[in-house]
């Protein structure tokens, strides 16, 4: 399973414009406060094919088929095509399916530079899946909140900002791996106008995670250790040693 990244988009504009944007990009099933990347950067339908070892095999079979067809004195009549296919697959239905998959992958590469949804999504959305929820209801406070796999969807936010060039918007994101992969980026007209990305594992990274997600670090078993100068898990502190040094900090 991937690391889940919590994302929130804040739109700095009047209420009417904000509401229009929220409804324009929402996932139709989840409603306002959600987002569907397909509405901003649609994925070509033909890319929705299996990706993995079966596709690897299919591409090898298809390359073999193309080479053997090219060796058939330029003939491409139905009988020659059937004969060449059978020479590659031996008539095995499973290999026939793999060959068809390989042909689709090859066509996708030619048209889109990607054989399937997987690499296309990473390249065009910045993450391998569309936005999703983990069971929560979408926010009703004029923001858009969602999860992504492994990374924040930077290309999607850039596209959103370009579509609404007169609206400043901030992407806040926080990895479930507390203290890493967290930040705030503000856009206008598709251009980054402000960026705050703390160093991984720094005090600011931990505290920004807490601020973005609304999670108290103490609820995760983290306390500030004045000796280490950073947050640590309680169980990692030597028994009997008081880690305090920032009394009253409620994170």
Image (spheres, rainbow, N blue to C red):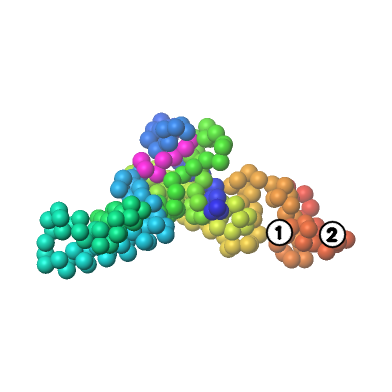
Residue 242, which numbered label? 2
Q: Is residue 36 magenta?
A: yes
Left or right: 227 in relation to 200: right
For label 1, the residue is: 231
Tell me where residue 69 sits by quadrant.
Answer: bottom left
Closer to the camera in the image, 114 or 167: 114
Left or right: 236 in relation to 123: right
Instruction: Give the residue at x 74% y 52%.
Output: 221
* Residue 163, horizontal then vertical, whole percent: 33, 44
What residue span does the magenta drawing correspond to?
32-39
Instruction: Give the residue at x 37% y 57%.
Output: 55
Closer to the camera in the image, 56 or 120: 56
Residue situated furthest right in the rendering: 240
* Residue 54, horizontal then vertical, whole percent: 39, 57
Left or right: 185 in relation to 45: right
Instruction: Give the residue at x 54% y 50%.
Output: 5
17 w.r.t. 201: above or below: above
Tell me where residue 165 sits by quadrant.
Answer: top left
What main secondary structure does the magenta stretch of the protein show? loop
Label 2 element class:
loop
Q: Residues within 10 Å of mark 2 (few under 14, many from 20)?
A: few
| Cα distance in 3D space between marks 2 and 1 | 13 Å
């Amino acid at each position: 399973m991937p690391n889940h990244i919590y994302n929130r988009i804040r739109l700095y504009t009047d209420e009417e414009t904000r509401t229009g944007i929220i409804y324009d990009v929402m996932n139709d099933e989840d409603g306002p406060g959600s987002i569907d990347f397909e509405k901003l950067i649609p994925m070509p339908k033909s890319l929705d094919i299996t990706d993995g070892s079966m596709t690897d095999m299919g591409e090898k079979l298809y390359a073999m088929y193309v080479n053997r067809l090219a060796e058939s004195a330029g003939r491409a009549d139905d009988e020659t095509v059937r004969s060449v296919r059978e020479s590659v697959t031996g008539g095995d239905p499973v290999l026939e399916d793999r060959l068809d998959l390989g042909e689709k992958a090859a066509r996708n590469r030619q048209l889109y530079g990607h054989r399937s949804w997987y690499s296309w999504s990473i390249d065009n959305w910045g993450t391998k899946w569309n936005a999703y929820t983990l069971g929560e209801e979408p926010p009703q406070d004029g923001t858009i909140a969602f999860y992504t796999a492994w990374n924040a969807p930077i290309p999607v936010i850039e596209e959103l900002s370009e579509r609404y060039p007169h609206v400043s918007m901030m992407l806040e994101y926080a990895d479930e791996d507390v203290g890493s992969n967290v930040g705030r980026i503000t856009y206008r007209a598709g251009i980054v106008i402000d960026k705050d990305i703390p160093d991984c594992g720094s005090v600011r990274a931990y505290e920004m995670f807490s601020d973005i997600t609304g999670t108290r670090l103490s609820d995760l078993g983290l306390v500030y250790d004045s000796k280490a100068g950073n947050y640590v898990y309680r169980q990692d502190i030597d028994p009997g040693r008081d880690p305090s040094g920032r009394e009253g900090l409620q994170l």
